[in-house]
């Protein structure tokens, strides 16, 4: 899978609020399915289903046998990939707007003499 | 004077959008002018290593825009679209297509917000048809990707001689 389709899968997995919440909680520490399901008003099966989507996107892993007692682990590197691409994109936008800053600075410098005259008049 | 806040970016996981926000140390009228005057726009929109030539810049509802990026007279990338809505100093809505991916189109809404102290906040909401397209935009970086490719080639060529 190339980086961009991997990124799509990650975004799709995170499109669901419950899954985002599961991920947020896993950033603190590993947890079992039972622990993860505790605060929700949904079945263990439903939570397992969400975890499966996250697992397929490479966001979480279950090192042990797929039982309710085995811990779920967050794969932080996948977030690094996402962060890296977004940061690169942001950096390019930032560079663009620094060029706009320079254009705006120049326009304001050109306008300044007029302003001074107005101030003198008042 | 560099109180300018850095660009922020948000890629939603619910809809295929990218939201960019940036503040400028300049009044709204000027930020607006830098977007609507093609001579000014050409000065900052393209990567520094490329020259931007605006071909069409008809800032009216329903009218067209197009610009081309060149390096040493050689065309690198071309972009086109049309102005869907223009409200002076408030917002521009336009479509945006990179000719290299002609089936792709972004619908972009640019909002110009006046801030205290003669500052301006610019927000660009970019909506595309699928998450795949949005994410490939983020991952590949369109024109800059092309440019970087050429830069690599430039570096490689002398070693081949």
Image (cartoon, rainbow, N blue to C red):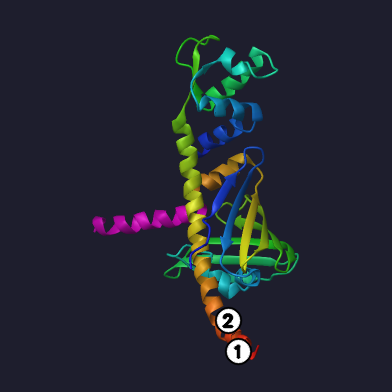
Vertical side of B122 occupied by B39: above or below: below
Q: Which chain carries label 1?
A: A
Q: Say which element carries label 2.
A: helix
Q: What's the residue at 52%, 9% (across, down)?
A: A69
The residue beneath circle 2 is: A111
Q: In this view, does B130 lie above or below B1?
A: above
At x 51%, y 45%, the residue is: A86
Residue drawn 55% across and 33% down? Answer: A10
Which mark sits nearer the N-terminus, 1 or 2? 2
Magenta range is: B141-161
How far from the left and from the top, in percent, is residue A39? Answer: 64, 19
Q: Is the magenta stretch mostly helix, strand or loop?
A: helix
Residue A67, percent from left and from top: 53, 9
- Residue B134 versus residue A50 in the image, above or below: below
**SS at mark 1 in the image:** helix
Mark count? 2
Give the residue drawn at x 66%, y 44%.
B129
Q: Which residue lies furthest to the front in this view?
A: A122
Q: Is residue B17 magenta?
A: no
Q: In this orientation, which residue lies closer to the viewer: A70 or A111?
A: A111
């Amino acid at each position: 899978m190339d980086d961009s389709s991997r990124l799509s899968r990650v975004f799709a997995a995170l499109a669901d609020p419950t899954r985002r919440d599961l991920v947020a909680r896993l950033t603190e520490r590993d947890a079992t399915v039972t622990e993860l399901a505790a605060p929700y008003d949904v079945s263990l099966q439903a939570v397992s289903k969400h975890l499966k989507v996250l697992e397929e996107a490479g966001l979480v892993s279950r090192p042990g046998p797929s039982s309710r007692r085995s811990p779920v682990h967050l794969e932080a590197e996948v977030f690094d990939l996402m962060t890296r691409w977004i940061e690169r994109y942001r950096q390019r936008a930032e560079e663009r707007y620094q060029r706009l800053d320079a254009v705006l600075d120049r326009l304001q410098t050109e306008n300044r003499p007029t302003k001074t005259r107005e101030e003198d008049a008042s | 004077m560099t109180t300018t806040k850095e660009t922020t970016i948000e890629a939603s996981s619910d809809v295929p959008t990218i939201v960019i926000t940036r503040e400028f140390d300049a009044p709204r009228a000027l930020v607006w002018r830098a977007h609507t005057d093609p001579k000014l726009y050409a000065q900052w929109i393209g990567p520094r290593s490329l020259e931007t030539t605006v071909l069409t810049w008809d800032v009216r509802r329903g009218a067209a825009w197009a610009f081309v990026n060149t390096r040493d007279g050689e065309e690198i990338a071309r972009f086109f679209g049309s102005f869907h809505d223009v409200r002076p100093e408030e917002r521009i809505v336009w479509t945006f297509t990179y000719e290299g991916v002609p089936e792709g189109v972004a619908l972009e809404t640019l909002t110009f917000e006046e801030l205290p102290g003669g500052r301006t906040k610019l927000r660009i909401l970019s909506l595309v048809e699928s998450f795949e397209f949005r994410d490939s935009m983020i991952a590949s970086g369109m024109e800059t990707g092309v440019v970087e490719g050429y830069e690599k080639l430039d570096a490689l060529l002398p070693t081949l001689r």
